[in-house]
Amino acid sequence: MAAALLSSRRAVAAAVACVLALALGAAAQLSPTFYDGSCPNLQSIVRSAMAAAVQQEPRMGASILRLFFHDCFVQGCDASVLLDDSPTLTGEKNAAPNANSLRGYEVIDSIKSQVEAACPGTVSCADILALAARDGVNLLSGPTWAVPLGRRDTRTASQASANSNLPSPSSSAATLVSAFASKGLDSRDLVALSGAHTVGSARCSSFRSRVYNDTNINSGFAAKRRQICAAQSGGTDGNLAPLDALSPVRFDNGYFRNVVGQFGLLHSDQELFGAGGPVDGITTQYARNGAAFARDFITAMIKMGNISPLTGSSGEIRANCRKPN
Ligand code: HEM
Ligand SMILES: *[C@@H]1O[C@H](CO)[C@@H](O)[C@H](O)[C@H]1NC(C)=O
């Protein structure tokens, strides 16, 4: 009797939540089994292509993960970032945060052509990117998880949104918190997702002002980075340094240990510790507890992957990730 009452209350609560979600315009649910019937080999195709790419160049796991972030933060996870400029479309690849920086497009093209050969016209570029990002993390010894699927591809892109929605490395903690909040991501998601900077590299132009002008930086570390990054912009702009010098191609919690020690490479990285506010405690927690970071990173990646997907009959399944059909 009590159990029946409880379960009927639960049913009412679920129905109310559902109506609320519809009223708020929440997207249809993505599901990890979306392609199980229509493209059963999808996940193994993506996995082996990513394994080959990461074996050839470990940094590629990082580059593909960043590509997914830059997709999801601009119009949602709709593969807008993959569209090339054309006479009729201005893509996002030449937006300031992406130009001469974002990479891995050829890897996605190659996976897409293998997936098209197996399951023509079935799997979106947006879903391929979501799976490839997950595999990139796992292939660099990070965690793995089931990726919700069923996104479709946009026919449009927005260079202006790429410029305004993607946070800059000069951002303050408050700016980062609000940029993520505007995408439905809280401070815990912000800190966990920033842990992606446990792999990959940044250009001198992204860390120049940090290593010359910030005071909350280990002085020996700053001096070492200045050796490859001249104070004035010019020939050294493209020189690379690892975001996590402790373990540049290992997806672990080293990033947080760096940040707590004032070894953050980007100004925005160091903002996650020492500026005060709720992010400090989360950064400390992840620096001490790699399992807590891995758990929260998975949660946050699934949340980020749920930003405004196109589903149902919206958008399209692109034949070529670089252009609308
Ligand atoms: C919190 C705000 C963030 C800022 C301000 C930021 C900024 C940057 C910058 C400036 C770079 C170096 C780019 C270059 O110099 O070419 C970079 C690299 C990278 N970012 Fe972020 N990022 C942020 C969040 C994220 C998130 C949420 C992810 C993924 C979940 C991510 C993944 C990466 C990866 C993996 C790299 C290295 C890419 C490579 O080596 O090719 N970042 N980020
Ligand atoms: C450091 O700060 C000064 C004063 O704001 C500025 O003129 C200079 O360009 C900065 N240097 C770098 C490398 O960002």
Image (cartoon, rainbow, N blue to C red):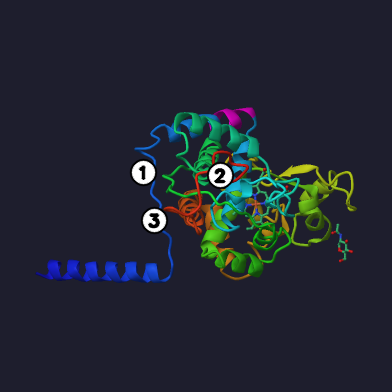
CA gap between label 1 and label 3 equals 11 Å
Disc 1 crowd rating (10 Å Cα; few below 14, some 14-19, many 20+) is some
Residue at 57% x, 44% y is 325
| Circles 3 and 2: CB atoms closer than 8 Å | no
Which residue is situated farthest in the left direction here? 1
Disc 2 crowd rating (10 Å Cα; few below 14, some 14-19, many 20+) is many
**Magenta: predominant secondary structure element?**
helix
- Residue occupied by mark 2: 252
- Residue occupied by mark 3: 29
Residue 38's image quarter? top left
Mark number displayed over residue 33: 1
Circle count = 3
Task: Look at the image and tell me whether residue 284 can be seen.
Answer: no
Whether 310 is drawn above or below 280: the answer is: above
Residue type at mark 1: give it. Thr
Residue type at mark 3: give it. Gln
Q: Which residues are magenta?
A: 50-56
